[in-house]
Amino acid sequence: MTLRIIVLQIALTASVSGCTSATPIDVEPSAPILIRQETTVLTLESLRASGRQRLRVFLERASRGRRDALHLLISGSSQLSAEAVHQARQMGLDAYSIHLLDQHDGGAVRIEAIVYHARPPVCPSYSGALLTEKSLHQPLGCSTRHNLAVMVNDPRDLLDNKAVEPSDGDRAAIPVATYRTFATGKGG
């Protein structure tokens, strides 16, 4: 019995010692994702046929084919603003991307189209066919940050997400507390 324990200890020591390396791994600091805001403005006196056409062309050019990434700030005449919102919704813009500001009667409407562009970090390429210890010196996670920056609709979410309200964690702790009382047998 004692011999089995000694053999098991030797086998575990040998297998664990193979997992360690004395070579230090230098990890470079992660490159930040830069966010750039591009704003274009259109002012319309009316939304008759020619005005509607100008608005549609404006929204198409401002979005560059990414209507999901377009944010509108509309101010001015309440009647023209409502028509501009209607036209934008018909083009497929989501209601949460359209914001009405400074509404009043009469006059023109000012439509500000904002698109946020994420500029991902440039990742170094792996030159060798096989991974070596030198390839571990490349920044870890660079391709993940690059892909994330390219995929998000609103890169501002990478900095601070206003859609998720902060909480104190009490609700998230309920399952843990329930599990602990169940495990100890002190449940009601």
Image (spheres, rainbow, N blue to C red):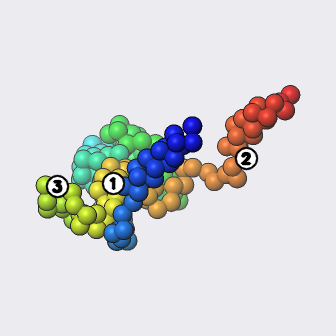
Q: Residue at x 67, y 43 (%)?
A: 172
Question: Up-down: is 21 above or below 67?
Answer: below
Q: Position of residue 66 (x, y in %)?
A: 29, 48
Separation of residues labelled 1 and 2 (CA atoms):
32 Å
- Return the residue at label 2: 170
Separation of residues labelled 1 and 3 (CA atoms):
20 Å
Q: Hey, what amino acid is under mark 2?
A: Asp
- Return the residue at label 3: 130
Q: Hey, what amino acid is under mark 1?
A: Thr
Q: Quadrant of residue 140?
A: bottom left
- Return the residue at label 1: 144
Secondary-structure class at tag 3: loop
Camera-side mark, 2 or 3: 3
Q: Position of residue 125 (x, y in %)?
A: 18, 62
Asked if disc 2 and disc 3 are in contact, CB closer than 8 Å, the reply is: no
Camera-side mark, 1 or 3: 3
Q: Earlier in the sequence, mark 2 or mark 3?
A: 3
Q: Earlier in the sequence, mark 1 or mark 2?
A: 1
Q: Residues within 10 Å of mark 1 (few under 14, many from 20)?
A: few
**12 or 92: nearer the eye?**
12
